[in-house]
Image: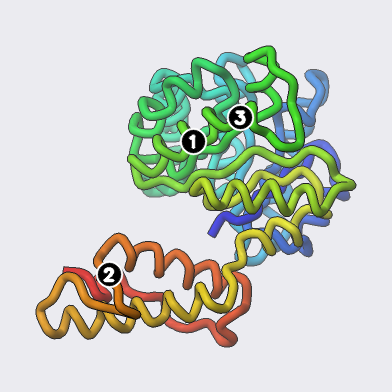
Amino acid sequence: MRRSCLFLPGNQPSMLQNGMVLACDVLIFDLEDAVSENEKDAARELVSQALLTLDFGMREIVVRVNDMETPHARLDIIRVTEAGADAVMVPKTVGATTVLKAASILDEAEEKAGLSHGSVSLILLIETAMGIEKALEAASASSRVSALALGGEDLAADLGCRRTKASHELYYARAKLVMAGRACGLDVIDTPFTDARDAEGCYKDACYARSLGFNGKLVISPHHLEPVHRAFRPDESEVAYALEVVEAMRRGKEEGRGAVSLRGKMIDLPVLTQAKRTIELAEASGMLGTKRRAPAKGDGEE
């Protein structure tokens, strides 16, 4: 579950410690934009020690490493892999070349750390016009890739367009990223909402992202966690319908049918897939009380 993916600067010990109590799905420790050149080595070690010594519970731990074209990237990947990161976020991804370079370093890092191949995944941060146009190429370049993420501010700078709260200028990029990610079976994470004081604006932006097919949003302020979670929380009627779909498809499978009638409409596998996503969001939002068994892959499927 990657509804909320919160950036924390890798050079601030107090912020890294706060990660133990912040109610996000994913913590992203940032070694790139948040860290000045003369602090890169110290931040890498600080983040590594945090991974080794602090308890972040069930949150997914991601480290945004430095640009793959810098000498820092290889050192970042090897060190944070040894320290136990779940995933590496690759900034400024442009096509397969960037991905394969990161994946090759991860092969080396996992071997050095005694980890099985594929233990650490890649999240590709796409931030340029060429990166957007090559999104499908990047998404399909390695089995390590688990998600695509949009960096809207850098992209706007590359496009030469003015960023607005409505974000209409990013519609094409958002749609293109969702298409590429879904075509490869990946999560897709939307760009951050940058006004830390505007919780309602963040909520509306997150609702729009969800409507486009994003799994969640990058977050740059803890104040945005609640509105993002609220945006990705299905309403009661959606959840009730999703549960009905799963049950109807289960019965249909028992009767040897791939499609069944529910509320006067025919439903089939794509509807079941959407229902399962809704139930997953409901569970993450605490709407179903004690966590129920997630629908198994074969529930209602042929």
Label 3 crowding class (10 Å Cα cut-off): few <14, some 14-19, many 20+? many
**In the depicted structure, whether residue 207 falls above or below residue 291:** above
* Residue at 61% in and 60% down: 232
Q: CA distance from mark 2 to mark 1?
A: 26 Å
Q: Is residue 77 visible?
A: no
Q: Which residue is mark 2?
A: 267
Q: Secondary structure at mark 3?
A: helix
User: Which residue is located at x 25 percent, y 81 percent?
Assistant: 250
Q: Which residue is mark 3?
A: 170
User: In x, y percent, where is residue 33?
Assistant: 74, 27
Tell which residue pokes out farthest to the left in this image. 256
Q: Position of residue 152 (x, y in %)?
A: 65, 29
- Left or right of 138? Residue 131 is right
Q: Quadrant of residue 78?
A: top right
- Kindly tell me whether residue 209 is visible in this rendering: yes
Residue at the disc numbered 1: 175
Counting other residues with Cα less than 10 Å from the Cα at mark 2, is it few (<14), some (14-19), or many (20 or more)?
Answer: some
**x 65%, y 66%: residue:** 57
> Of label 2 and label 1, which has the lower sequence position?
1
Q: Which mark is residue 119?
A: none
**Which residue occupies the extreme front position in the image?**
264
Q: Nearer the viewer, residue 22 or 242?
A: 242
